[in-house]
Amino acid sequence: MQLPGKNTKPYLAIILVLAIIFFAIWTLLGIILIRGIKAIPTSSQATAELVLETQPTKPLPNKTPQPKPTEEVDDPVETQEPDPEPEPEPEPGSVATLDPQTEEMMDRIEQQVSEVRSLTMDKRIPRKVLTSEELRVYVEEEMLEEFDDEGSLEDMRKYALLGFFERGFELRPLLEDLYSEQIAGFYKIEEGEMYVIADEKLTINERLTYAHEYVHALQYANYDFENELNYNDDACEDDSERCAAILALIEGDASFSQFRWFETFSSVNDIVELLASMEDYESPVLDTAPPYLSASLMFPYDQGTTFVKQLYSLGGYDAIDEAFRTKPPLSTEQIMFPERYPDDQPLKPEMPADPALLLGDDWELSDSGTVGAWDMFMMLTKGLESAAQLDDATALDAVEGWGGDTYHFYQNKSQDEFLFVMYALWDTEKDSQEALTAFNDQLVRRFGQHQNGLHDSHGYYARLLQQGDNGFVLIISEGLESLNTIYEGFKK
């Protein structure tokens, strides 16, 4: 499934502050384990590879450049001053400048990252720095430019069926605040431009961000995402599950390589600075966001890094290159359980019966696609109500063995009603029973004890129905009659 407003657009690669902090902990632990505490140099021994001090970037007046002064001449000819041209609208980052020392530091990071990642590119990447305020303007005017407020309310109502959001939840204000708080940098693929968020100077977090984003630049200079990987808007609209897996490969590679860079070139000053930034880090918007939203934002960084780390352990960057060129992951299950890559191919089952025919002409298909192992995991663990959440270990055991699924959302406008139906197949009968038990447990936690298989609470109705030896159907509806219609039709 694809949450409306989430950044899954192939033309924009972003890194979140939370991703930096999360993997900074992982990296620092790795450095200490590998080097040993005594092996870390003292401050007097620290190299200056990554600790070049920078001056705060200063805004430039928003006007056209002035010509250089010329030598004075006798009796200059008087000329009429032309009418002033209107000042151009500022582009993102156009009001910030980089001092030569910062440019030098960024050049060095690019060379180091290219060495670590074993990829090169033959052109210079334009660099831009945004302040936090400029980032918020960019989020509102460009990242969320196509955000459909009316459609979002409808989408939130559908996601409320699954227990992820409250009915009527307004997503846009949260995304504006969340992206403004969490985006540490991004790489605009079509323009080939690098953006780093920095209000004063480029701290170690901004340098980590720059390393991460330069990996993205190397990726898009060396791999054909549009054609070979078929990673584009149209293809991702048709198969969001496959594109979620590819996004995890992209961000996992950038995160893994970013911290291999840090591990290779960091000094003790960098480590101390990073530890201090972790202690000071606060994320009030993310901390209060619905669990499903924050977990889905972190998936490509967290799970993606684990997946890429596994590839690297098997064949170094050659194995990662192969995943980009000829063997991309095809499902979030392969990302979550790397040992299932690349042989465990996802199935694309059809519904046992046509829900549209069962429901009648008043109902229309609102959305369809694949839920996938990751969103099933979140259905079990990241509901809005903590009492309805299963523990992660139980849910992971339940979704491993996912074979494939299909889901439909239907809407009855005349009755103002939505219905969700999902048909899932599993690799074995045991896998299916384990998942069925977990979903039943989650429904009991959310709705209370069922009556003859019917879960009913707060205007929602739900049923599970086993289908064959290794499949089952989950139905959740805002109306009891529509739920029973699907249930009885599928039973036949």
Image: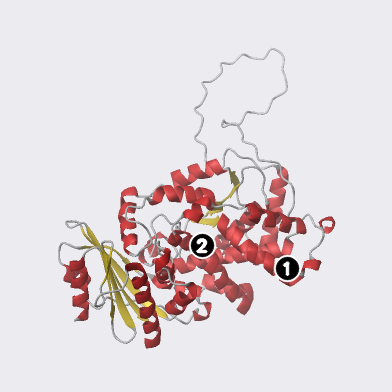
Which quarter of the image is occupied by the N terminus?
Answer: bottom left
Determine whether the residue tagged by mark 1 lies in a helix, strand or loop: helix
Would you say the residues marked 2 and 1 are in contact, meaning their CB atoms lie under 8 Å apart? no
Q: What is the quadrant of residue 163 in the picture?
A: bottom left
Q: Residue at x 44, y 51 (%)?
A: 175
* Residue 463 picture location, percent across and down: 27, 73
Q: Amino acid at mark 2?
A: Met
In the picture, measured across the screen, residue 262 lies left or right of residue 393, that is right
Give 18 or 76, whichever is nearer the viewer.
18
> What residue sits right under mark 1 in the picture?
32
Which type of secondary structure does the marked residue at label 2 adopt?
helix
Q: Looking at this view, is 228 or 491 the one in front? A: 491
In the rendering, at what x and y percent does residue 149 appear? 34, 48
The disc placed on residue 298 is: 2
Spatial CA span between label 2 and label 1: 25 Å
User: Where is 452 relative to 258, above or below?
Assistant: below
Count of number-bearing discs: 2
